[in-house]
Image: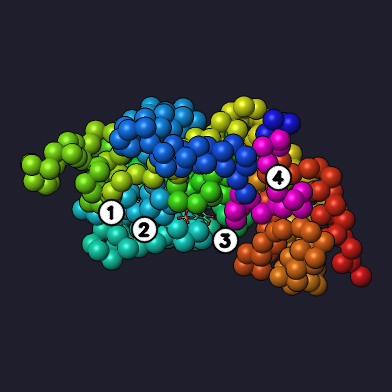
Amino acid sequence: MTTYEADFSEPDGYMNFASIGPPGRRVAAALAEIVAAVSHPSGDVPPLVMGRYEAALATLGRFVGAAPEQVTVVPSTSAGLFQVAFGLLSAGGNVVVPAHEFPANLYPWLRSAEAGGPEVRRVEVPDGRVTAGVLAAAVDADTRAIAVSLVDYATGFRVDLAALRELAGDALLVVDAIQALGAIRVGLSPADVVVAGGQKWMRAGWGAGLMAVSSRAFDRLAPTLTGWWGVEDAFDFVTPPLHAPRADADRFQEGSPNVFGAVALAAAIDVIEAVGVAAVEAAVLERSGLVAELAAAAGAEVRTPWRHETERAGIVTLRMPGEDAAATVARLAAEGFVVSERSGWVRVSPHASTSIDAVEALAAVLGAVRR
Ligand SMILES: Cc1ncc(COP(=O)(O)O)c(C=O)c1O
């Protein structure tokens, strides 16, 4: 893991990757390099930046097991989900989504429904276990999409995508992977759409996320939000719009793509691939597992909706008996630990660069509250 850790310099008490992942040296260098290149161009700028953009898309595709034509860069997780939700605007039927999803995976569907799109079926999942069994009651022959977070932002529960694929059948399986990508291996298959902003576990900064799209999704999604960049012969300004949508995933662009963001994402992937995504995942699971174990030993109530290792990722939520979660967060902050409060729980989210010593020290501070 030393190659991974060596790229980063956040304080060791920083365990808030489910909120924001501080970028490392490689991302900073890649951004500085492309800014310098366009600041002092030796010729025209578009060929220079487009070469970098294409190379970045190839890296993004490889990272999620997709062809370069199946991936694009979106401004945020939400923006990618809006593309999908409005791509289904005229599809009729319904979309099934867990009711407790992060709002980024609710607003696009609800806005689309307001505009005449599919009915939104919000499924209550009281124990946080988003399984095919619990969603099945809402799925029927008119279901156009099932939309879930791969890892839940609040509980840390990781869904079984293979089981959800089976449940979805021919409907689209749409995955918000922002709480997984960069920490846990993520593939486009068996989903139809995978979208994840780069600002958390990827550590690529804001303004760019990865979106990967299956051929089924290409067939189903109308180009409702496709703008000038997303069409064939975009630079043919003689033939008036509407042009046909592009054959590749850049059809999901409203305008010029975020080339700088794509370069940052690709650099972030280089850092992960230098040690291998499996090694990063193992380190994340080790640290989050240790948080759960040591916090429980320190007297915390730890929320563990998972029954198998495959059902958890980098997020652990807990609370100390008799102590408000916000007070615990403040007490940890005073000792140099950065974590978040979410709906009355303390959310701890270490990455592979977090030291085991720091996890042990956090648990010691947690335990110090016991009276
Ligand atoms: C599950 C989930 N989806 C999406 C987001 C963010 O969405 P966006 O990239 O659109 O800001 C977050 C957190 O901010 C999240 O936890």
From the Cβ of disc 2, is ligand 1 less than 8 Å away? no
Q: Nearer the viewer, mark 2 or mark 4?
A: 4
Task: Please identify the residue farthest to the right as the structure is shown.
Answer: 371
Sequence-wise first label, 1 or 2: 1
* The stretch drawn in magenta includes residue 16: yes
Q: Nearer the viewer, mark 1 or mark 4?
A: 4
Residue range of the region highlighted in magenta in the rendering: 5-21
Who's the residue at 40% across and 50% down the image?
75
User: Can you identify the residue that label 1 sits on?
Assistant: 86
Q: In which image quadrant can residue 51 be found? A: top left
Amino acid beneath label 2: Pro
Placement of the C terminus among the 4 image quadrants: bottom right
Who's the residue at 66% across and 65% down the image?
341
Sequence-wise first label, 3 or 4: 4
Task: Please identify the residue farthest to the left as the structure is shown.
Answer: 239
Amino acid beneath label 3: Pro
User: Can you identify the residue that label 2 sits on?
Assistant: 108
Mark 3 and mark 2 in contact? Answer it, CB < 8 Å. Answer: no
Q: Which mark is residue 9?
A: 4
Q: CA distance from mark 3 to mark 2?
A: 23 Å
Q: Which mark is residue 126?
A: 3
Q: CA distance from mark 3 to mark 4?
A: 38 Å
Q: CA distance from mark 2 to mark 4?
A: 36 Å
Q: Residues within 10 Å of mark 1 (few under 14, many from 20)?
A: many
Foreground residue among 54 and 182: 54
User: Residue 97 location, x and y as percent?
Assistant: 43, 55
Placement of the N terminus among the 4 image quadrants: top right
